[in-house]
Amino acid sequence: MDPADATLPILTSIVDQPALATKIALIGLAGGLGGGLFGIGGGLVIIPGLTMISGGSIKTFQVAALPVGVCVAGSSAVKNLRAKMINWRWIRWALPATILGSWIGSMLAGSLDARILEVLFGCFLTATALRESWALWWGKEQDGKATPLRAAPVPVLALILGTLMGALSALLGIGGGILAVPWLRMLGGLPLRSTVATSSILVLLTSTFATLARIIPILRSEGFAGLHDEARLMICLLPGGVIGGYLGAVLMYRLQVRKLAAGFIVLLIVFAARLFLGR
């Protein structure tokens, strides 16, 4: 355990530690709301939240957050499917590349400098935030299509997106939605709500592959006993994550697009700053 986490309590019993379990449940709710509202999955909120209130390994938190991310994306996808806002052309082309990217990421995880990737990723998020701020300032953020900046056809861009999402999931431990949303906005030129809805499906697929990639090796080497800590965290996180994911998707369709865009810009800036400063 990191020395800085030595004074933090570790969840060993949900019944005997109700206060800690409640805090973890609220983190799950916050992760679900953020995932459903912006199509980013819940891990980017859940993992930092857990490191702030509970001692333990970051790897344990990642394994616990991944299946929660699947449920968050799944619950928000229910609302997005009903609204018929998903762009299936991007999904069809990105899906096989996501599987390939997960394999590439797992193979390169030990040889690439993740810090360089984080900085490059932060630059991309910053550029997207500037682009979104410009559109919001001049009143160009509407439900209609944005002007895409793409120089390649959708199949090529979707294949690249899927590969990067899979690779980043393995290298950085994220669901990939924080990449998919700005990618679909800047290069795909999709309306904001369609972007969030499409990203939720991509996150659902990516998180599923990442969950299997992380859990199967543990089960093979240690059996179910190797997932005791993760299971306790998942039990606390899941209810709030599922409820929050659906409520976030509902709010996404009720908020004015300009307010949604403003919230998205703030989110981009926060995560870009986090990447530049280090995790």
Image: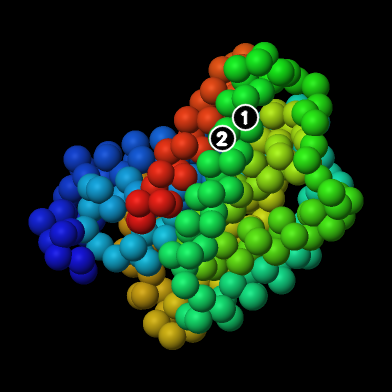
Displayed quadrant of residue 121: bottom right
Q: Residue at x 74, y 32 (%)?
A: 194
Residue that numbered label 1 is attached to: 132
The residue that appears at 56% across and 35% down in the rendered structure is 129
Mark 2 closeness class: few <14, some 14–19, many ≥20 residues within 10 Å:
many
> In this rendering, is residue 138 above or below 151?
above
The image's colour scheme reads: rainbow
Q: Is residue 143 left or right of residue 136?
A: right
**What number is the disc on residue 262?**
none
Q: Position of residue 271 (x, y in %)?
A: 45, 43
Towards the viewer: 183 or 135: 135
Q: x%, y% of residue 64? A: 42, 58
- Relative height, residue 100 to residue 10 (above, below): below
Which residue: 47% across, 72% down? 113
Whole-angstrom CA distance, mark 1 to mark 2, is 5 Å
Residue tagged 2:
129
Residue 54, given in percent of the width and then of the height, sits at: 23, 53
Instruction: Name which quarter of the figure residue 253 lies in.
Output: top right
